[in-house]
Image (cartoon, grey):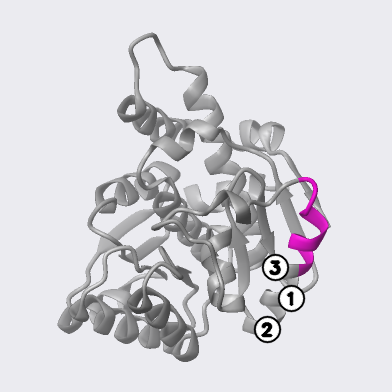
Amino acid sequence: MFEECLNHVRERSPLVHNITNYVTVNDVANIILACGGSPIMSDEPEDVEDITSVCGGLNINIGTLNKRSIEAMHLAGKKAAELGHPILLDPVGAGASRLRTQTAVSLMEEIPFTVIRGNVSELKALAQGSTTTRGVDADAADAVTENNLDAMVRFVKDYAARTGSIIVITGAIDLAADADRCFVIRNGRPEMGAITGTGCQLSGLMTAYLTANPEDHLQAAAAAVCLMGLAGQIGFSHMQEGDGNSTYRNRIIDAVYNMDAKTLAEGALFEIK
């Protein structure tokens, strides 16, 4: 199912504008390059409209906010919407502070996001106005589990219907849904949580997949989630004695770089509900 999505990214080399946080900006750029895309990083308000105009997709990540970058997000988002580009929102830490939550809500009110991707606590904060967000990480009390899976599938489908966006929740079990279909994805390794920025990297990678696959954005989003999780599995299998989370980060990027359609098709673990 996902082979065509991967091949389109390799063939079309989508140019992605990223307004992302400075903690992970280099890793986001590298993983977009690894998957076959091309990244541009710009968050200067006087620059972003021109930059997003020459790109095919826009990735907005609110991980490290300031007044200048917030202004840039609104300007770039409106320009991307005007041009009909796919736009992704990564509401890092929504629910953890008033500024983060208000920024995400304001962006969602003004910009028609193709995908909203975050952890379950962030998305519950935006959808329900209540959360147990622990900093920028999801709280264990919010986790998607086999026991609450049906309820969480209903939640993401409902939120997708309310927002008009594809909703992607990432965690031990990942969900990617529109109002009608939900991909339940079980790729990945728990050790990925020990690396700063795997979620940010996924948002950049996913924007490349959305940009290169306009025919089916939900399938493209699900393919990106499976690919990232599978890269985590492959990267971990190559770990050696003495390797730590820094090496693991590089092995994940290398696994994305070396991923082919056959490996993704055979390794993707998902069902559709």
Q: Nearer the viewer, residue 1 or 233?
A: 233
Between 128 and 2, the one lying in front of the other is: 128
Q: Determine whether label 3 and label 1 are within 8 Å by CB.
A: yes
- Which image quarter is the C terminus in? bottom right
The answer to whether the residue labelled 2 contacts the one labelled 1, judged by CB atoms less than 8 Å apart, is yes
**Mark number displayed over residue 158:** 1
Task: Tell me the amino acid under the disc marked 1.
Answer: Asp
Name which quarter of the figure residue 216 lies in.
bottom right
Q: Position of residue 105 (x, y in %)?
A: 46, 83
Is residue 153 in the magenta section?
yes
Pointer 2 residue: 162
Residue occupying image coordinates x 63% and y 51%? 143
Judge left or right: residue 244 versus residue 119: left
Q: Is residue 259 visible?
A: no
Which residue in the structure is indicated by mark 3? Answer: 156
Indicate whether 230 appears above or below 138.
above
Left-right relation of 232 to 247:
right
Query: Horizontally, is 56 left or right of 70 in the view?
Result: right
Residue 139 seen in render? yes
Q: Residue at x 65, y 33 (%)?
A: 262
Q: Which residues are magenta?
A: 146-154
